[in-house]
Amino acid sequence: MPNIQEEIKKRILVLDGAMGTMLQRYNFSEEDFRGEQFKDFPHSLKGNNDLLSLTQPQAIKDVHALYFEAGADIVETNTFSGTTIGMADYHLEEYVYQLNYESAKIAREVADEFTARNPEKQRFVAGSIGPTNRTASMSPDVNDPGYRAVTFDDLRIAYKQQVEALLDGGVDLLLVETIFDTLNAKAALFAIEEVKDDRNIDIPIMVSGTITDASGRTLSGQTVEAFLVSVSHIPLLSVGFNCALGADLLKPYLQTLSHNTSFNVSAHPNAGLPNAFGEYDETPEQMQAQIRSYLEDNLVNIIGGCCGTTPDHIRLIAEIAKDYKPRIVETRFIAS
């Protein structure tokens, strides 16, 4: 049975790149998104990438395989929006368990195939848990700052269902990612702890926040140090950052994080910043050079890519990651 806690001590682990970027290449139509199961569904489903685990499972399987072939140790399930809250826009709340379960099963199957081919390099599946499209600590209405579109309990219940399905589908670890509101993440972590207690199990947890701009804060206003303190109350496999920024702009925040935590550190930055058309232009070679500076400065234990990254980006990252030792995890404290 693969043990990521042991593997992370031996080497820098490589996370996959963007799922959405790869799925865009298929240019799926409304009919493709619907598949057979939803051919008569009364609402539009185009753009719901999580649904493709049910309607285009081969495409999801192929993307996972491309990332493993590129050298990834960990792939994320295709479940970034896989909660009843996230699926409400598509009127698919009742399919959330199936979406998560099947997504986890697909990733598990591909991971096991690659591990069987090369047992020396174990492959892992991370259950992707996104932030949802609502925020528990801020109002969406500037004229009513006390209003909340979602409650902590709403989030906790939704996340619990997602976590149960991901575990049933066979994930090795859970990744609470792209955290722009730490209260949302707290609800996810609370739900995970509930499921762990209910099932009397332990499961490694990665937590990954998002620094939204040059202010160095999350959308809900936390600095790196404040974010770290907020999530450090439970044992984590790793804490890190992803999305919003490219590798170069993310580095100073990773340095702060790395110097202040005794957890492993992860990073999966974007392929630079989006251009005027919302596309990412940073080449694999450019990103590799920036990631090399992370490795030289001993900042990370897990490294991968977010928006705009492809198997080509991950291949070049994996090529250099194997030449460096993982960041040494020491007991550190944030100065008060």
Image (cartoon, rainbow, N blue to C red):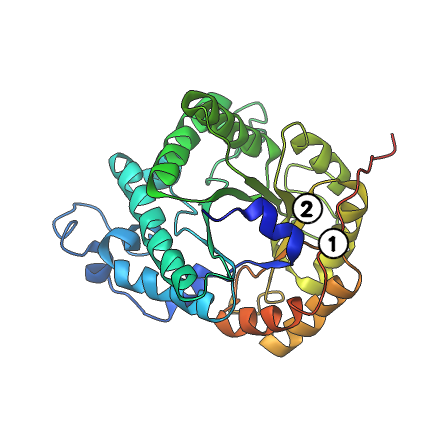
Name which residue lies at 40% across and 57% down: 111
Question: Residue 104: x, y in percent?
Answer: 36, 47
Image mark for residue 29:
none
Q: Image height check: is 324 above or below 5? A: below
Furthest-right residue in view?
335
Q: Nearer the viewer, residue 153 or 312?
A: 312
Does the CB distance between marks 2 and 1 fall below 8 Å?
yes
For the question of whether residue 283 can be seen, the reply is no
Q: Which residue is mark 1?
A: 327
Which structural element holds mark 2?
A: strand
Q: Residues within 10 Å of mark 2 (few under 14, many from 20)?
A: many
Residue 184 located left or right of residue 65: right
Lateral position of residue 91 relative to residue 294, left or right: left
Q: Compute the Cα span from label 2 to label 1.
A: 8 Å
Q: Is 7 placed above or below 218 here?
A: below
Q: Amino acid at mark 1?
A: Arg
Q: Earlier in the sequence, mark 2 or mark 1?
A: 2
SS at circle 1: loop
Residue designated by label 2? 264
Q: Position of residue 173 (x, y in %)?
A: 49, 43
Residue 20 seen:
yes
Q: Is 124 drawn above or below residue 61 in the view shown?
A: above
Residue under the point 68% across and 32% down: 232
Residue at image x 70%, y 74%?
289
Query: Where does the C terminus fall, quadrant-wise?
Result: top right
Question: Count of labels shown?
Answer: 2
Q: Is residue 232 left or right of residue 110?
A: right
In front: 43, or 128?
128
Residue 125 in percent (x, y) is at: 45, 50
